[in-house]
Amino acid sequence: MAEERRRRKREEEEEEEAEEWERWKRGRRKRRKRRRRRGGEEDPVDVLGEEVMGRVMELLDARSVARCTAVSRAWRGVAADDRLWAPKCAELMAGKAHIPRLTMIPTASKLSTYSMAIADGKRTRITKEDLCDHDWEFRFTIAAPEYWRNLDPSWKHTGPPMRRYFHPDGYHSADPHDAVWGGHECTYTIITSFAGNGCIRDHYVRINRWPPMKVSRKEDWSWELSNHLYRYNSIPDTDKKGCTGPLFPVW
């Protein structure tokens, strides 16, 4: 008896699925007829199929594919596919100095990953994670006193630029035997002030009570901290395990 009930239940489910499929086909035919009466063209997804549409979208740039997701539910199903966005993510991050940590969120779609990476690459508000995750090259500017510039091997072309390091506990350090550093006890602070409308009015990094350094971002997503005397440049580290920067979006 139990076997008979299971068999009947399977038959009923199959009949329901077949009816649902027939209703969907009838609805699609009706939609096509309405489009013909209005003089409209058929949806390319219906005509070509999702696989062919996906091949077509592979030839489009990322902005155009993103716009395709807003056309219809059928178009979004094709345009938001991870298989389509995975190579675009790889192309976006090729040649970048740093890969944002938020691109490593395992549950995020490739489309979301691409969008968050673009937004993070335009971010100019630096965080403690950004400072601590990178090593930094230190150079004096032309406005620095000549005595200081003579201690800088990159100015004299006698060696690579000096390096600086930020630590999570607020400590700032340099390599041993750094001629400029001289064993100073240094701490750093990130200062951000906001205007009344919520926009950032001022944003800089300060070491001890030395001149503040303004924050800027380059096209390769690297960071620069600078004032009239010296500047810091983040060293590229795209192969760093776990990537760099904050895990959650910061605007």
Image (cartoon, rainbow, N blue to C red):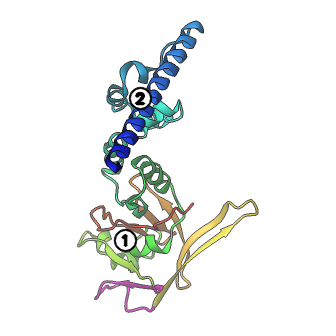
Distance in Å between CA atoms under marks 2 and 1 = 59 Å
Name the residue located 47 percent from the left edge and 31 percent from the top edge.
74
- Residue 243, magenta (yes or no): no
Question: Quick one: which residue is furthest to the right in this view?
Answer: 196
- Residue 178, magenta (yes or no): yes
- Amino acid type at mark 1: His
**Would you say residue 68 is visible in this rendering?**
no
Q: Is residue 214 left or right of residue 88?
A: right
- Amino acid type at mark 2: Ala
x, y percent for residue 58: 34, 33
The residue singled out by tag 2 in the image is 18
Nearer to us of marks 2 and 1 is 2
x, y percent for residue 50: 37, 29
Secondary structure under the numbered disc 1 in the rendered image: loop
Q: Main secondary structure of the magenta part?
A: loop
Residue toward you, 65 or 220: 65
Region rendered in magenta: 169-185
Name the residue located 45 percent from the left edge and 23 percent from the top edge.
22
x, y percent for residue 26: 49, 19
Alpha-carbon neighbours of circle 1 within 10 Å: few (<14), some, or many (≥20)? many
The residue singled out by tag 1 in the image is 134
x, y percent for residue 86: 33, 46
**Would you say residue 166 is visible in this rendering?**
yes
Q: Is residue 95 left or right of residue 79?
A: left
Residue toward you, 219 or 226: 219
Q: Look at the picture and state if 163 lies above or below 90.
A: below
Q: Look at the picture and state if 68 lies above or below 167.
A: above
Question: Quick one: which residue is furthest to the left in this view?
Answer: 158
In the rendered structure, find residue 121 and report the number of the disc placed on it.
Answer: none
